[in-house]
Every structure is written in C-alpha cells, then in structure tokens.
C-alpha cells in the first residue's frame, strides 16, 4: 500500500479534430481534367489541387469580351453624335429633342458598358474556379472524386479535406457535476494545464488549454460541450482519434492507494485482504474512492502501515496463517514503489 498526495482529475472522453478543418469544393460545373496532389501529403496555400475542363468558361470569357467591345463601340458612336449635335442645337440649326435623345443613348451606352464589364468579370471568375487551389496550408486527405467525374452540378461538390495539425483540438462533453467542480477550481488556479491521454494509454507530451465552453448545458443529456487545444509537434495526433482529456481539480493529501487488483467486490461491498501483525489474514471492508492509473484511493477501512494482499487474494481465507517476505509494488502514475510481502499461500501482500 502506498501513501502520498494524489491529484484528483476531472476526465472526459472526446474526439480529436484539426485546429482548422477546410472542405475543398468545386465552385463551377464541369468534368474533372486532373488531380494534382498526393493523398495524405502536406500542401501549401495556393498549390494546384484539381483542374476542371476550362473550355466552356474560356468561350464564355471570349463572348463577354466581344460584348464589352461592342458596348464600348456603341458608346463611342453615341458620344460622337452628342458632340456633333451640341453646336448645331446652340445655333438653333438642329432640333433640341434629337440632342436629348442622343444624350440618353450615351447614358444607356455607359450602363451597357458597365453591364458588359460585370459579365466579363463574372466569366473570368468562373474560369479561375476551374483551377482549384489549396485555400490554406495543411495535410490533405483522400480525393472524393476522380478524373472524368462531373463535379459542381446543382451544388458545390466536395473534392477533399485539408486539416491544419500544428495544433490538435479535442471536443468532448462533461457531466454537469464535473463541470461545476472544474469551474469552481478554475477560479482558484489560473488556466490549469490539461492532459491528453491517447488510445494506447500514453500521455500526449504537450499540455493543453481550454478554448471553448458552450453557453449552456444540454438538458437532454445533462452535459456541457467543451473543446481543448493541444500543440501537436510532428503531427502525431490526427483528426478522428478518440482520447481522454483530464484536468486537475483537487489534491488528496496523504491518500492511501492500493492496486485495483487487491480490491474484491461482491454485491456492492468492497474488501481488501489484510495481513495482521500475527501473520493471519483479515478481510477488511473498505470504501474505495477515485481511481488513479492502476491504483485505487481507499477513503476508509485501511490504516497507514497495513499490509495488504495484492496477488492471489482469492486463495486466502480469514484467519489463515501466512509467511511474508519483501517485494515491490509500482505506482503507474508516478513510478514510485512500496514494500511488498509474499505469504506462504502464494499470495502477494504489500504495505506502505
């Protein structure tokens, strides 16, 4: 059995996501001519990803340019008419009504030029959309379309995803009671460092911070949505992984810890086999608390210095005589150890 100060954590299971998740979509309709990246590679902002057949849009640009040229020519002719009519009208040699009509034609011609220019700008913009470039740096996923597919019909077609992974975010839900514990503790400590425990049990080397807490508790589940951000050097952690986020909310001073395998449970009653000073076995009812890695905090039922059986407890019975010898138990969270004993029954006992 070990005795030491133990940090108490609030813990939740969440799913990882990139610091930025970008959907790349086709903005114009057409057949896909080329895919110009390697799936899963790092891409840079502005890098060419796809090319959509541009011929239809090149023709639209050429037509828009012709309409603009025609509108400019019509405007020039109307302006010449106004310039010619004005001195004649001033000499009462030409009807003023015709001058007014020519001026109106000039104004209409200018509007036609503006409209033709807007059409050309729109056509050029659509032509530029046939070259799909990366909107940001990041790691690109698999392509959702292949060369020859028709994209962009009816709605923007999803082409691929890009994730920025210099930071990794974890979105999770926390029960209301745990949220209150964390929120109250946060008032006492400034920005507690969060830990990220990965699927293989390893702890992510970089501490994280809370970046988002939802405005309200979900009344259907009694949980609150939160998000934490962690630096991700080497982009080891990828989107879609399941992980546990934990934050310290308290410290239990002088806590007694026993290996979980030393605690037996039957019908809601927890027992630990204790080796008494006369080397006989006693089954002690205990009250377990929080779990800490592979250990269990015992809140009541044990005293410092008690020797407990941690291996083969099912082989012993109350009052059985045992012979103990020294051994070691490990604390998986802090790599500390205590003194152990091995009874003659083949069970293993330990004390602080």
Image: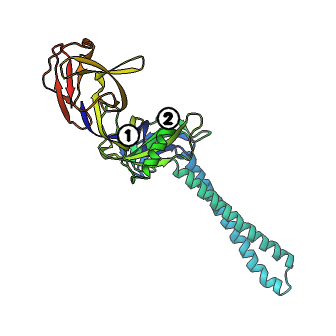
What is the CA distance from the residue labelled 2 to the residue labelled 1?
54 Å
Please report the residue visible at 62 percent of the width from the left and 39 percent of the height from the top. Answer: 154
Q: Residues within 10 Å of mark 1 (few under 14, many from 20)?
A: many
x and y, in percent, of residue 322 in the image: 17, 15
Kindly indicate the quadrant of the structure image that contains residue 99.
Answer: bottom right
x and y, in percent, of residue 302 in the image: 29, 28
Identify the residue under disc 1: 9
For residue 82, the mark is none
The foreground one among 85 and 100 is 100
Please report the residue visible at 74 percent of the width from the left and 70 percent of the height from the top. Answer: 107
Q: Is residue 310 visible?
A: yes
x and y, in percent, of residue 218 in the image: 57, 38
Q: Is residue 38 visible?
A: no
Q: Residues within 10 Å of mark 2 (few under 14, many from 20)?
A: few
x and y, in percent, of residue 216 in the image: 57, 44
- Up-down relation of residue 61 to residue 331 (above or below): below
Please report the residue visible at 45 percent of the width from the left and 43 percent of the height from the top. Answer: 181
Q: Secondary structure at mark 2?
A: loop
Please report the residue visible at 20 percent of the width from the left and 36 percent of the height from the top. Answer: 336
- Up-down relation of residue 72 to residue 214 (above or below): below
Q: Secondary structure at mark 1?
A: strand
Task: Determine whether, in the image, residue 60 is placed left or right of residue 237.
Answer: right
- Up-down relation of residue 13 to residue 207 (above or below): above
The foreground one among 47 and 215 is 215
Q: Residue furthest toward the front?
A: 278
Tag 2 near tag 1, CB within 8 Å: no
Task: Determine whether, in the image, residue 296 is placed left or right of residue 178.
Answer: left
Q: Earlier in the sequence, mark 2 or mark 1?
A: 1
Identify the residue under disc 2: 148
- Quadrant for the C terminus, please: top left
- Up-down relation of residue 340 to residue 114 (above or below): above
Q: Residue furthest toward the left?
A: 325
């Amino acid at each position: 059995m070990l005795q030491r100060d133990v940090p108490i954590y609030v813990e939740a299971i969440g799913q990882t996501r990139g610091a930025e998740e970008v959907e790349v979509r086709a903005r114009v309709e057409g057949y896909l001519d080329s895919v110009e990246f390697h799936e899963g590679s790092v891409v840079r902002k502005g890098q060419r990803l796809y090319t959509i057949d541009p011929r239809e849009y090149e023709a639209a640009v050429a037509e828009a340019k012709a309409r603009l040229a025609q509108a400019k020519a019509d405007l020039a002719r109307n302006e010449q008419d106004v310039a010619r009519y004005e001195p004649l009208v001033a000499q009462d040699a030409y009807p003023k009504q015709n001058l007014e009509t020519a001026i109106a034609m000039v104004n209409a011609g200018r509007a036609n030029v503006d409209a033709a220019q807007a059409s050309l700008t729109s056509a050029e913009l659509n032509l530029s959309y046939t070259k799909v470039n990366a909107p940001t740096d990041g790691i690109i996923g698999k392509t959702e379309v292949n060369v020859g597919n028709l994209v962009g019909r009816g709605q923007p077609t999803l082409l691929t995803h890009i994730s920025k992974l210099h930071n990794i975010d974890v979105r999770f839900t926390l029960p209301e009671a745990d949220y209150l514990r964390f929120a109250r503790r946060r008032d006492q400590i400034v920005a507690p460092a969060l830990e990220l425990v990965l699927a293989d049990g390893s702890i992510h080397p970089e501490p994280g911070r809370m970046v988002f807490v939802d405005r309200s508790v979900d009344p259907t589940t009694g949980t609150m949505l939160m998000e934490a951000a962690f630096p991700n050097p080497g982009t080891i952690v990828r989107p879609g992984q399941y992980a546990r986020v934990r934050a310290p909310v308290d410290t239990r001073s002088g806590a007694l810890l026993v290996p979980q395998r030393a605690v037996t449970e039957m019908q809601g009653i927890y027992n630990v086999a204790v080796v008494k000073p006369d080397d006989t076995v006693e089954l002690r009812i205990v009250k377990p608390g929080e779990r800490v890695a592979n250990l269990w905090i015992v809140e009541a039922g044990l005293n410092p210095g008690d020797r407990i059986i941690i291996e083969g407890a099912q082989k012993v019975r109350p009052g059985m005589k045992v012979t103990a010898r020294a051994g070691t138990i490990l604390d998986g969270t802090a790599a500390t150890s205590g003194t152990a004993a091995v009874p003659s029954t083949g069970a293993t006992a330990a004390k602080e």
